[in-house]
Amino acid sequence: MSVTSSAQPSVTQSSVRTQAWVSAAIAVVIFGGSLPATKLAVLDMSPFFLTAARAVIAAVLGAACLWAMRAPMPKKADIVPLLVVAGGGVIGFPLLTAVALQGIPSVHSIVFTGLLPLVTVAFATLLGEKRPRRLFWLFSGLGAACIVVYAIGHGFAVSPMGDLLMLLAIIVCGWGYAEGARLGRRLGGWQVICWALLIALPVSLPLLWLTWPADIEAISVPAWLGLGYVGVFSMLIGFFFWYRGLSLGGVAAVGQLQLMQPFMGLVLAALVLKEQVGLSVLIVMAAIVGCVIGARRFST
């Protein structure tokens, strides 16, 4: 009897950890297509229209989910964190990356997503999450340094504004992820993004009306497909899995899975956009993955 009772918690803990990693992995695969899809869309759409349209599409679907599941209203204490999630994930990151991608190729922008695990954990620590060990910060810092060196050596002088916008996008996105993971433990991961989308509607809906294209028929089918992807998958479904994974497994450990995202994006950029993936990009990605493996080992 004593053996069975002592083994049960470890089995349960292992199951929860597995669910966390599977959920986060699905999310990262979905998010991997975000920047290539955004690049497709901004070829024919303004970044402001794209940001507003994807947010409104996802908000309509999110409202339907909340109504179908009879989800309770968030508490007053949840409003400010939801505003942070909305500002970072619904408006900030989509808009900043869309503007940046007007001046830089998606392959270049994808490398910056390697900073997201470090930034997310930094914000999570500030918000009260368990502080990782010092070696975690060492490996994470080395990964961030790889990004900085790459940016300086490959295009920063050509498009400094594009790189700065990508860096700012990563910061606001990491903050939103950290707040969303904390909220997910109380509200449920899928409810976090649905409520954040509804809270953002007073901004996204007027912006959609103000930026509506003068010639809607001039927008190509690939651009509409890009909008459809980021509106349904990147803006909604991906977050269902992502916040669930972070809530179950912890930001520091599970968040490191996000280093799969650049590889997914690079493959899609090469296949869909026909952009060249140079050797330098692959070297940087390999170095970042090495840093993330080290950071994950010392995340708890």
Image (spheres, grey):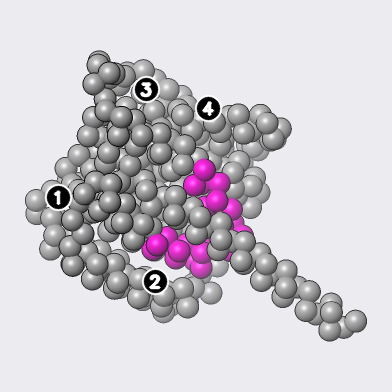
Quarter-of-image position of residue 256: bottom left
The kind of residue tagged 4 is Val
Determine whether the residue tagged by mark 3 lies in a helix, strand or loop.
helix
Query: What's drawn in magenta, residue-wise?
Result: 237-260
Q: Where is residue 98 in the image (x, y as percent from the top left)?
A: 28, 39
Determine whether the residue tagged by mark 4 lies in a helix, strand or loop.
helix
Q: How many numbered marks does the figure carry?
A: 4
The kind of residue tagged 1 is Pro
Give the crowd class for mark 2: few <14, some 14-19, many >=20 residues within 10 Å. many
Closer to the camera in the image, 207 or 265: 265
The label shown at residue 44 is: none
Q: Which of marks 3 and 1 is in front?
A: 3
Q: Where is residue 212 in the image (x, y as percent from the top left)?
A: 31, 19
The kind of residue tagged 3 is Leu
Residue tagged 1? 160
Q: Is the magenta stretch mostly helix, strand or loop?
A: helix
Closer to the camera in the image, 35 or 95: 35
Q: Residue furthest top?
A: 214
Closer to the camera in the image, 223 or 12: 223
Alpha-carbon span between mark 1 and mark 4: 36 Å
| Label located before the other in sequence (1 or 2) | 1
Alpha-carbon span between mark 3 and mark 2: 38 Å
Residue tagged 2? 292
Whether 155 is among the magenta residues is no
The kind of residue tagged 2 is Val
Alpha-carbon span between mark 1 and mark 2: 26 Å
Residue tagged 4? 60
From the viewer's perspective, is 149 left or right of 38? left
Q: Do the residues labelled 4 and 2 touch (CB within 8 Å)?
A: no
| Label located before the other in sequence (1 or 4) | 4
Determine whether the residue tagged by mark 1 lies in a helix, strand or loop.
helix
Q: In this view, does 68 lie above or below 279?
A: above
